[in-house]
Image: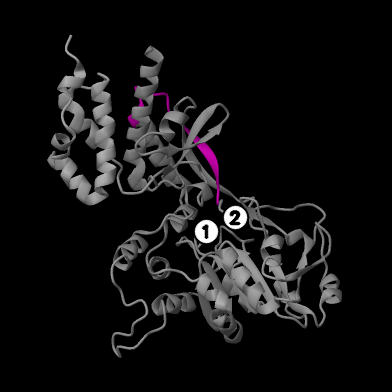
């Protein structure tokens, strides 16, 4: 028997394949060489034929020079933190491509002098929230709140309700975040109830500001009471409100979710929020409020450490000025339309795998509108396909429920239906293949 190692092609011979030459220019030579090395090893072990080495190497290459992979979000969670939160709009993606090159980020082309960094994005944010005298952007929502605390309350105390000392994910907690910049927390009320008089007694000459935090990832029900922004604005202290999810204006489907415009109208001096949740933009932290406070934050040395890059600036502006974002489209999805899509997908899977159209309840997710159910529709398939779909090309992530895998369509763009259908077909074929063994 001929030793397969003798017939294995040389590395340089495989790398000269025109497809791999093109891939090396696009992805980098290291990634392509690793793929070729893997294919050659398979050839030496007799798993693939020598003439198939270049094909196998090419097929194993990633889409891009990054470990990140495009995922179809069929979980029914619109803003899924583990899946990167808000998917960007086509306008924002185009803006990212433009910003990746050389831009006039801090140059006034008319005068040739240094210009205000990200001025057009800041102008777009100011137009979106006209109640704000001034606006600023930092690298995430937690950074916006930390900057406010460092500038306005370092060495002082922040008055906050006990029920608003929330954990914001991955073990990070609001109280620890605030204390890390040198402030002292003065907790008022109890876990479930707080009154205006509690705040009134706590505010004194040592108060940096009163902080109201929207508990955006949980709901407390039953014997509860809170104090509104309007009421808190009567206190003799600055009022900072962290609305969390980045909703700039009221949305009918989310009536209990605070938004920046109403919060400022109600008397908040400063509002902080995230940009990659309900706003549907890139990760960033929004700061909106009085001109005097925002300018103080902007000029503080810590602001430099928290500033956003040109890619974020571009994507944020396009999110604010462009067409509806994928998050907005999902939140406004018509269940009747989702039903028709699900029926088409189920029909296309007939004879391949058992697929049933079922009613579903989706969630906003991402620390926004907790407890709000969004009517949706899903395609139910065997839960055996869950793992196969997660490792497919592209990966598809669904939700296990009642012994089935639900592929909820609320956060799946309609243009991905064919992709989703084909992914289920491949997973079903792989499942049958595994069963044959």
How many labels sit on residues? 2
Q: Is residue 378 left or right of residue 217?
A: left
Res 227 visible: no
Q: Which of pointers 2 and 1 lies earlier in the amino acid sequence?
A: 1
Q: Give the residue furthest to the top.
A: 1
Residue 305: x and y, percent? 52, 71
Distance of label 2 from label 1 (alpha carbons) = 8 Å
Residue 83: x and y, percent? 48, 47
Tell me if residue 240 comes above or below residue 337 in the rendering. Answer: below
Q: Residues within 10 Å of mark 2 (few under 14, many from 20)?
A: many
Q: Residues within 10 Å of mark 1 (few under 14, many from 20)?
A: many
Residue 190: x and y, percent? 83, 60
Q: Is residue 390 left or right of residue 266?
A: left
Quadrant location, the N terminus: top left
Res 233 visible: yes
Q: Was residue 20 drawn as part of the magenta stretch in this picture?
A: no
Q: Nearer the viewer, residue 229 or 32?
A: 32
Q: Are marks 2 and 1 in contact (CB under 8 Å)?
A: yes
Q: Was residue 354 drawn as part of the magenta stretch in this picture?
A: yes
Residue corresponding to mark 2? 367
Residue corresponding to mark 1? 277
Tell me if residue 67 comes above or below residue 87 in the rendering. Answer: above
Q: Nearer the viewer, residue 35 or 148?
A: 35
Residue 408: x and y, percent? 47, 40
Q: Which residues are magenta?
A: 348-364
SS of the residue at dot 1? loop
Query: Residue sitting at 73 percent across and 60 percent down?
Result: 165
Query: Residue sitting at 46 percent across and 30 percent down?
Result: 387
Looking at the rendered structure, which numbered label has been put on residue 169?
Answer: none
């Amino acid at each position: 028997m001929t030793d397969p190692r003798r017939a294995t092609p040389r590395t340089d011979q495989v790398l000269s394949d025109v497809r791999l030459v093109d891939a090396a220019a696009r992805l980098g030579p290291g990634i392509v060489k690793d793929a070729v090395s893997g294919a050659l090893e398979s050839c030496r072990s007799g798993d693939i034929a020598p003439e198939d080495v270049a094909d196998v190497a090419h097929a194993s290459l990633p889409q891009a020079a990054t470990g990140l992979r495009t995922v179809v979000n069929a979980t029914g969670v619109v803003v899924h933190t583990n899946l990167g939160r808000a998917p960007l709009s086509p306008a924002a993606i185009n803006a990212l491509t433009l910003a990746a090159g050389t831009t006039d980020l801090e140059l006034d082309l008319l005068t040739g002098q240094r210009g205000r960094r990200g001025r057009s994005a800041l102008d777009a944010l100011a137009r979106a929230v006209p109640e704000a005298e001034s606006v600023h952007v930092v690298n995430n929502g937690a950074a916006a709140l930390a900057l406010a605390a460092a500038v306005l309350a370092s060495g002082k105390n922040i008055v906050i309700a006990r029920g608003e000392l929330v954990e914001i994910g991955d073990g990070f907690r609001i109280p620890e975040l605030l204390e890390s910049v040198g402030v002292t927390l003065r907790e008022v009320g109890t876990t479930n109830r707080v009154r205006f008089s509690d705040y009134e007694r706590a505010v004194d000459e040592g108060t940096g500001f009163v902080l109201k935090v929207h508990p955006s990832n949980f709901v407390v029900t039953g014997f509860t009471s809170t104090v509104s922004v309007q009421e808190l604005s009567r206190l003799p202290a600055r009022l900072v409100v962290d609305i969390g999810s980045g909703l700039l204006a009221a949305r009918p489907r989310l009536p209990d979710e605070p938004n920046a415009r109403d919060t400022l109208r109600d008397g908040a001096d400063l509002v902080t929020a995230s940009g990659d949740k309900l706003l549907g933009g890139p990760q960033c932290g929004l700061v909106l409020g009085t001109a005097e406070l925002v300018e103080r934050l902007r000029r503080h040395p810590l602001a430099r450490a928290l500033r956003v890059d040109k890619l974020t600036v571009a994507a944020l502006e396009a999110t604010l000025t462009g067409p509806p974002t994928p998050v907005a489209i999902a939140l406004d999805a018509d269940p009747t339309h989702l039903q028709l899509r699900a029926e088409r997908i189920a029909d296309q899977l007939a004879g391949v795998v058992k697929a049933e159209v079922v009613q579903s309840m989706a969630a906003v997710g991402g620390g926004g509108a907790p407890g709000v159910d969004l009517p949706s529709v899903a395609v139910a398939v065997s839960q055996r396909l869950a793992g196969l779909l997660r490792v497919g090309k592209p990966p598809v992530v669904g939700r296990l429920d009642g012994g089935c895998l639900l592929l909820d369509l609320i956060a799946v763009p309609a243009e991905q239906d064919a992709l989703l259908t084909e992914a289920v077909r491949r997973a079903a074929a792989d499942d049958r293949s595994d069963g044959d063994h």
